[in-house]
Amino acid sequence: MLRAAWLVGLGLLVIGSLLPGSSPAIRWLSGVSDKVLHFAAYGVLATLAWVGAENRREALRSVLIMVALGVGLDCLQHFIPGRGFELGDVLADNLGLLCGALCGVRLLR
């Protein structure tokens, strides 16, 4: 069940990351810092990945996939109207992943 939630979350993350800046969803979230959104989304996904994995190797692989996904999605935003690549977003993604993975480790103790 947790793995399915992680996959759904990844799908929503990809969709949300590739929406144009003028989309209703992006405008609706404009009152919240995008760095907070990046940190929270990747943190929750890392926690789900860690807790839902069958072993540590699978959990670590999932988190590393999300590192690459975060960089890739931010690079793709360069080509989307109203969006752009920001190193701060990549940093927020990775800090969220680290914190989420640590939360996952704690939850499994």
Image (cartoon, rainbow, N blue to C red):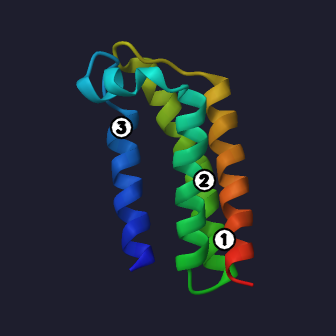
Count residues near mark 1 (Cα–Cα under 10 Å), then give few for <14, some for 14-19, many for 20+: many
Residue 88 visible at all? yes
As drawn, the label of residue 104 is: 1
Count residues near mark 3 (Cα–Cα under 10 Å), then give few for <14, some for 14-19, many for 20+: some
Of residue 74 and residue 105, the one placed in the foreground of this image is 105
Check disc 1 and give the amino acid type. Answer: Gly
Which element is circle 2 on? helix
Give the spatial CA distance, label 3 vs label 1: 24 Å
**Who's the residue at 36% across and 72% down the image?**
4
Of residue 36 and residue 80, the one placed in the foreground of this image is 36
Which element is circle 3 on? helix
Count residues near mark 2 (Cα–Cα under 10 Å), then give few for <14, some for 14-19, many for 20+: many
Image location (x, y in percent) of residue 46? 59, 61
Image location (x, y in percent) of residue 54? 57, 86
The quarter of the displayed image where residue 56 is located: bottom right
Disc 2 designates what residue? 43
Q: Is residue 17 above or below residue 42?
A: above
Check disc 2 and give the amino acid type. Answer: Gly
**Who's the residue at 72% across and 45% down the image?**
95
> Mark 2 against mark 3, which lies toward the viewer?
2
Question: Sequence order check: which comes first, mark 3 or mark 1?
Answer: 3
Give the side of residue 21 with respect to residue 100, left or right.
left
Check disc 3 and give the amino acid type. Answer: Gly
Residue lying farthest to the left in this orientation: 24
> Mark 3 against mark 1, which lies toward the viewer?
1
Give the spatial CA distance, label 2 vs label 1: 10 Å
Q: Which image quadrant: the N terminus?
A: bottom left
**Who's the residue at 53% across and 68% down the image?**
48
Residue 71 visible at all? no
Give the spatial CA distance, label 2 vs label 3: 16 Å
As drawn, the label of residue 16 is: 3
